[in-house]
Amino acid sequence: MDMIKRPRRLRSGEALRKMVRETRVSPSALIYPAFVVEGEGRREEIPSMPGQYHYSVDKLLYKAEEMLSAGVDKMMLFGVPGHKDACGSGAWAEDGVVQRAMRALKERFPELYLVGDVCMCEYTSHGHCGILAGHEVDNDKTLDYLCRIALSQVEAGADMVAPSDMMDGRVGAIRSALDRAGRSNTPIMSYAAKYASAFYGPFRDAAGSAPAFGDRKSYQMDWHNSREAVKEALADVEEGADIVMVKPAMAYGDIIARVKAATNVPVAAYSVSGEYAMVKTCGRLGLGDETALMCEIAAGAFRAGADIYLTYFARELAEAMARGLIG
Ligand code: PBG
């Protein structure tokens, strides 16, 4: 047969396949999101996210040690406070659960890079991501609170803040609040294109943050849209975002690619709780190999253009990388 181009030639053995691989990954790109609760001695499995736990601050230290020894040196913290109120005061309290966790982690593991998720929904009694005016979230009023949260996290040891609330103008507001406080070197990773996604279901269980009424569609994005994601990302970069994030990751490869092409900052992708739970469920039901599914889904995000990947599978993924199962 007279055939010049034979794509199979480059697939003929593992060494060759690895050499011509287009996507390479490293544990340095991974951020592990963890849930911190009040109290002591607590390590309680989250029913909707098998293999993920609520940690009290003392137990979180052990988890951090485990992550560091697996080669994952970045964590993002979500707080599940004991007390919630209308203005989410637990989110910026000096002795708030995240602030205490950050202080303890930094003291014990100075090499651990800490990202603070800046949002209100885990701390508000109504479960919305901002301050309410009637049944609406008041955008501009919420900005002051987000600035307070960001500052309190940075004061507690956060190396970076990641606003996830989707209020307009929050990146600019947080940037100037940080600058005024002498924190001009603290980067902001904005959840720039955060969709109103059903994939957050398990997280809302884990964080107790489901909205008490209505939904988040007046602030999170409509998942039919992609040009709007570019608009959001460009606006955030304009306001001072150092990194922009796309969330969720798995059904949003096109968005990752578009945002990557439209901006010149690093792009993060957040593989959310529903993606994690789906892989776990497939594994448990014997429908697929959990590790292989995890690797393929992660490679999809990196292939689409993600530079940074937030995942509850961070440790397992780092181990898979070390074993050559991915990248
Ligand atoms: C807080 C926040 C959410 C997630 C991250 N930050 C939930 C939401 O917006 O409802 C989702 C994370 C996940 O599902 O893993 N606003």
Image: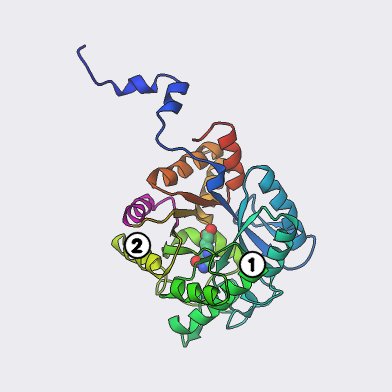
Q: Residues within 10 Å of mark 2 (few under 14, many from 20)?
A: many
- Where's residue 133, x and y in %? 47, 87
- Spatial CA distance of label 1 from label 2 is 27 Å
- Where's residue 154, x and y in %? 61, 69
What coloring was used for the rendering? rainbow
What residue is shown at x 45% (from left), y 27% (from top)? Answer: 18
In the drawing, does residue 64 fall left or right of residue 198?
Answer: right
Q: Circle 1 is placed at which residue position?
A: 79
Asked if the residues shown at circle 1 and circle 2 are in contact, with their CB atoms under 8 angstroms apart, the answer is no
The relative height of residue 32 versus residue 302 in the rendered view (above or below) is below
Q: Image quadrant of residue 232?
A: bottom left
Q: Circle 2 is placed at which residue position?
A: 229
The relative height of residue 9 versus residue 56 in the rendered view (above or below) is above
The relative height of residue 49 versus residue 220 in the rendered view (above or below) is above
- Where's residue 281, x and y in %? 55, 47
In the drawing, does residue 230 fall left or right of residue 176?
Answer: left
Q: Amino acid at mark 2?
A: Ala
Q: Which residues are magenta?
A: 246-262
What residue is shown at x 68% (from left), y 73% (from top)? Answer: 96
Is 104 a magenta residue? no
Looking at the picture, tell me which residue is in the foreground, 28 or 303: 28
What residue is shown at x 43% (from left), y 54% (from top)? Answer: 267
What residue is shown at x 52% (from left), y 45% (from top)? Answer: 279
